[in-house]
Each structure stands twice: as C-alpha cells, then as structure tokens.
Amino acid sequence: MTKKEVVKMVLDGKKPPYVPWDCKFTIEALEKMKKHYGEDVDVEKLVDNHFIKLGQSSGFKIDIGNNRKKDIFGTIWDMTYEKDIGNVEGLVLPEPSMEGYQFPDPNDPILYAGMEEKIAANKDKFILYSIGFSLYERYWCLRGMENAFLDFMMYPDFCKDLLHQIADFNIAVIKNVCERYPEVDGIYFGDDWGAQKGLQMGKDIWMEFIYPEVSRMYANTRELGKYQLIHSCGDIAEIIPELIEAGVNCINPFQPEVLNVDEILPAYRGKVAFHGGLSTQKTLPYGSVEDVRRETLHLLDLGKDGSYIFCPSHATEGDTPIENIVAFIEIIKAQKK
Amino acid sequence: MNELFSQLATCIEFGKINKTAPFPPNMKDQEGSHEITLQLLNQGVSADDILQKALIVGMEKVGVKFRENKVFVPQVLMSAKAMDAAMAHLKPIFAENNTMSKGTFIIGTVEGDLHDIGKNLVAMMVEGNGYEVIDLGTDVKAETFIAAADQHPGAVLGLSALLTTTMNNMEKITKAIKEHNQEVKICIGGAPVNQEFCDRIGADSYNPDPQGVVEFLNARAS
C-alpha cells in the first residue's frame, strides 16, 4: 500500500494499517538534525513523510536584501529572528481602502514553479498544494493585525470585500492547480484563527467574516474533487462542527495544550481527521526522551482506528533537544517494521 | 452626574468612541466617550473623578469579560480606542496638575520576539485602569528593562513572550533584572508561559489574561 493510499484511508474515515505521519522542522531544528545525523542527511528521506507539499505555506517571497523578503502581495518580511516565516514589516494597506492596490496575478508562474518535478519524484506520497496565510492571515498581513481587528468593527464592508477578493485569488489559483496538475490530491489551507484560549476574534466575528469565505473556498475545492486539509494554530474546538460542514477533511496542528486530544479525536473520528498532537509548547522542548516516547506512543494508540495523522503540533522548533527529535522519529517509523 | 458617569462607563465597556463612530451598531448616533468626557469636564467634574468613576469602571468590565471569553480582542481594542478618546482630554489636565497615577508599569516583549498584540492588550488594560504605562516595544534586551526600572523606582515590569524559543530569553532577562535589583517586581505572560515557568525563573506574577495583571497591580497599590 502506498503512502498516498494510507493517507486517503485516514481522510476517508477508514482504519489504516498504521498511523501515517508528516513532520516538519524549522531551520534551527534542521541544523540540529544535520549535526546529529550528518551534514548530508536527507531529512525528508530520513523521516519518510507521507505528504509532499507544493506551493508555499507562508506565501511566495523574493529576497530583497537586508534580511528582508517581499511576497507577491507586497508584504515585506523581516527574516532576522523568525527565519522560517519572518515577521511582517510595515503595512501594504495603511488605510481601509484598496485604491491603487493591485492583487497578484493567479497565473504568475512563481505559484507553480517546480511542481512537475516534485510530483514526478513523489508519486507514492499524498500530494498537497499549500496555500498559506489563506484568508484572515493574508488580510492582517496587508492591513496590520490591530487594524484587522478594528476593521471587523469599524469597516465591516471593506473587510468583507477584501476577504472576498483574497478568497477569489485563492479560488483562481486552486482552479489552475487542479487543471494543470491532476495528480494533486488535496489543498492545504493555512490560516491561524485560534488563540491559547478560544478564537482570536471570537466565534460571532469568525462566523460573520471568515466562515462565508472559507465555505466558498472549500466548496470550490470539493467541486474539483480534491481533499482539503487546514491548519489553524490555537484553540479552535468551537468551530470544528462548522469546518466539517464546510467539507474539511483534516485539521492541523491539533495542539494538545489547547485542545483535549483524548476527547476530540474519538468524538470526531470518521467525520474529520486530525494531524498533529505532539506537544511543541511543553513535551518536545522541556520533556525528557521518555516523556516524548510516552506521548508519541499514546497518540499512535489513540489514532490506530483512524482519523489521525501523527506530527508535532507545529514545525519542530530549534529549542527541542535532538534526543527528543530522534525519539519520536524512531517510534513512528518502527510502525512499518 | 451619576447618569453621565454611567453612560461614559458604558461607552468604554462597549467601545463607543464618538457620535459618528459606526461601532457598536446598537449605539449608532449616540454620543461616545469623546463627547461625554467633554460634558463632564464642562460641568466642572475633576479629571480624576472621570477616570475613577467612569473610565476604570468600564475598562474593568471589559477586562473581566475578556477573561471569561465573553468578548475578544476586537472588542477590547475598541474599548481601548474609546478610552484613548477620553484620555486625550484628561491627560493634559493630569500633566498640568502633576497628578499622580496609581503607579508605573513598564512593559516589553523580550529580546528575540517581535510579537506585540498580547503586550499591547496588557498595556491598554493597565493604562485604562489608571496606571502610567511605559511601553518599551518588542525585542527588548535585559539592559533596557533594567535602565527603565532604574529610571522609575517602584515601577512593576511586564515581560511578554509568544514563543517557546524566546521563553529562554524571558528567563535570562528576569534573572538579570533580579540580580541587578531584587526588589523589582516582574509580571510575565504569553501563550506558552505558565505558573510553573514563572516559579522556576523567579518572576513574581504570571497571569493568563490582562485583567490578572491589573489585579496584581491593584493589590500592590492598595
């Protein structure tokens, strides 16, 4: 059975032969892994992930020097501290107006660069096209986060219009991806809505502003016959029913510090899958190897009947001891032996 | 008079800035914190009474509702905007009279971390409760916190971190501040921070929400 088939079983609510996994690592964590496994280690091969992600999880960016990158929406990213995604610098839309602003072209070749080669090299894997910062996050990258929160209240019409146009852009990109690359199995939407406790904007605002547009994007993806997987950090427990209704097949990162994994996974098994679960706020950075082993084995047991894909609940950060990284990699791979 | 205090507290609680502000929709065309503060001042009410009997009352309600997940970041920001509109009239009076605030709170996001929403929410809530707030911004080094604390004896420090990777810096900064002056009180907060971490690094107070910081400061001020 190929990795693609195992992942599809999970997303279809069936019991897989083992719990599949897809684990990512930050640049700093990768450096630790190179020191441990050797400079020439192929981490993808070592970890033996089940997904291959095309597209970009945090936007298409070009280097503009001085430790800065610019994405196709015009947002400048300071890469000084956060080297994987960066931190937004300045505002693209300082006023609640799109006058003079030009949306990127959904036919820009940068959006599809290198896809044929990656697909050809990973045919046994579940192939995802990643649209990072897919709605609300794209909005606040353009307007600034405080402005975004205030726009919900002060400029609701502008806010809905901009969110609608962001969704339109994504829908056009997804259409292109599906038409040009039929091998793609699913779309991976990233958009952080959660806080440590509840949604950042609260459910009422999420329902009024975010839900109509994600529903539209997800309906489009389903019509094109693709699976849809989403990523939202934080406590999003209260909107899981709405996400299922909108056709979501899998939810990442399933943070154990804010979501009760032992209750949520069995409660929704068969309706939606979860991808994540291993604590990156506590166990990985601060726990012992034994703690990591115990939590990993518990998650694999919890997910053995389906609806679960293992990974740390975020790209593994550089503050994780290498012994803890080695521990969970060994356990997940041992499932197939 | 009491009616105006109550109206002003309501404006703060629900984020009504001025008469033309569209939010909240159910207070459309009603006067906001800007107009009502001016009315109170014109009637000879002292700035301190306006702060104590209306603004702080409204902000405290918002803080409690935020803690209880009854309102969220957007509503808190609107309340802060309404507070700013009122304080724009009161601050010159406080400055002229050299009126003492309840105390000074120095806040910053620790070195290596550029996240500021949580820090800003705490700063707004603390200021809205009658304290002078000195915001050192993000990516703040230990020496900057120490210099600010030296300049403002008796001030409480607030350290924020969103990432597990920058919690290490929170620990280093806390220890450096305490080594310099054991008497300085330090509050810490941020998504991955908890009481256990607070105890381990020797900080004085951990709070999962801004109202907790206000209550810590109020307990010290009383």
Image: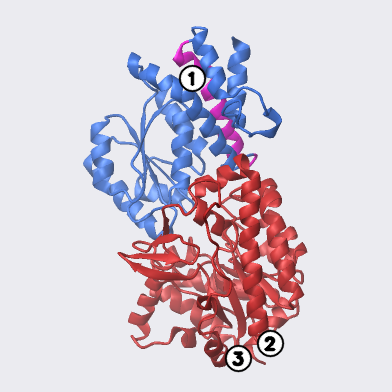
Chain colours: A red, B blue
Residue B153: percent from left, percent from top: 27, 29
Residue at x-position 67% and y-position 75%: A175
What's the CA distance linking mark 3 and mark 1?
66 Å
Please provide percent x and percent y for residue A208. 70, 49
Chain letter for mark 2: A
A109 or B30: which is nearer to us?
A109
Residue under label 2, please give it. Answer: A5
Q: Name the residue under label 3.
A: A123
* Badge 2 and badge 3 both on one subunit: yes
Bounds of the magenta segment: B46-70
Q: Is residue A299 above or below residue A96?
A: below
Identify which amino acid the numbered label 2 is placed on.
Glu
- Queried whether the magenta region covers residue B60, the answer comes back as yes
Is A164 on the left or on the right of B186, as rendered?
right
Measured Cα–Cα span from mark 2 to mark 3: 11 Å
Return the chain for callout 1.
B
Where is mark 1, residue-wise? Answer: B51
Q: Please tell me whether mark 1 sits on a helix, a strand or a loop.
A: helix
Which residue is at 42% across, 58% downward? A87
* Quadrant occupied by the C terminus of chain A: bottom right
- Residue type at the position of mark 3: Lys
Q: Helix, strand, or loop for circle 3?
A: loop
Q: How far apart are marks 2 and 1 (CA)?
A: 64 Å
Question: Can the viewer see residue A305?
Answer: no
Above or below — where is A139 with respect to B156?
A: below
Main secondary structure found in the magenta portion: helix
Earlier residue among tags 2 and 3: 2
